Image: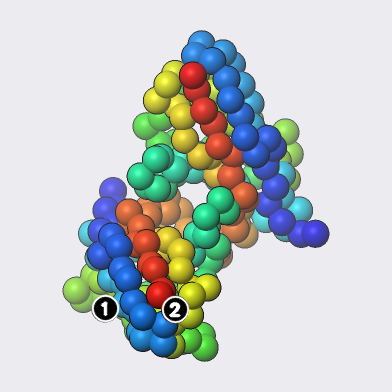
Amino acid sequence: DTAVSQTPKYLVTQMGNDKSIKCEQNLGHDTMYWYKQDSKKFLKIMFSYNNKELIINETVPNRFSPKSPDKAHLNLHINSLELGDSAVYFCASSHSAYEQYFGPGTRLTVT
Amino acid sequence: GENVEQHPSTLSVQEGDSAVIKCTYSDSASNYFPWYKQELGKGPQLIIDIRSNVGEKKDQRIAVTLNKTAKHFSLHITETQPEDSAVYFCAASYNNNDMRFGAGTRLTVKP
């Protein structure tokens, strides 16, 4: 199936831990994104990568770092997790200025 | 930066009635306006989009209108069905960069 996939779907961890969320797209898109959706459903862009270059970096803590080993992958690393990091994280991809396709989301719970 | 406001936050309609969701944006440079539908436990899915060179676009029961002068755009769903129940998001961006989302509208279609 052609799609945007994320792993894991659920992630429960303790404060202070370091965790990663993986994202892969097989749509041949050249731009990938990470969004955070909080408990009130508000969607906010965190990062986007175009051809391995960071082109948007919202005012997120530097504990969050995107890593793109190739055009089809954009992983999100989070260091020293805090309670406020609990949210659903969505990966998305697009071909330049065209529509964005979202992954199924990763629900992160920090205890 | 862009600021997108969306109304109403909740909308309940009877099956078969029409539903209208409205959004305003602040950045006159924005030229791409997608609408996403998010079902419970899933990622947002693009349902329709419009670019600033047109004023209206229709796809079966869904239509979007854009008023560039007033900087607002609307989603119209006709002949609503229970499966239309979901959270709907509007968004605005310039060439798909730095996409800003509205706060979402929870639509409930009562059978």
Q: Residue at x 61, y 29 (%)?
A: A11
Towards the viewer: A97 or B63: B63
Towards the viewer: B87 or A73: B87
Q: In which quarter of the image is residue B74?
A: bottom left
Question: Residue A96: x and y, percent?
Answer: 58, 58
Q: Quadrant of residue B31?
A: bottom left
Left or right of B4 in this view: A87? right
Q: Which residue is drawn at 47% across and 35% down?
A: A87
Left or right of A106 in this view: B82? left
Question: Residue A79: x and y, percent?
Answer: 54, 17
Q: Which amino acid does label 1 sit on?
A: Asn
Which quadrant: the C terminus of chain B?
bottom left
Q: Residue at x 58, y 25 (%)?
A: A12
Q: Residue at x 49, y 19 (%)?
A: A111
The label shown at residue B111 is: 2
Can residue A8 be seen in the rendering of this structure? yes
Mark 2 or 1 closer to N-term?
1
- Binning the other alpha carbons within 10 Å of mark 2 as few (below 14), some (14 to 19) or many (20 upward) gives few
Q: Is residue B97 above or below residue A33?
A: below
Secondary-structure class at tag 2: loop
The extreme right residue here reads: A1
Question: Residue A101: x and y, percent?
Answer: 60, 58
Per the model, the C-alpha gap separating discs 2 and 1 is 33 Å
Q: Dot 1 corresponds to which residue?
A: B67
Towards the viewer: B45 or B31: B45
The label shown at residue B15 is: none
Left or right of B71 in this view: A51? right
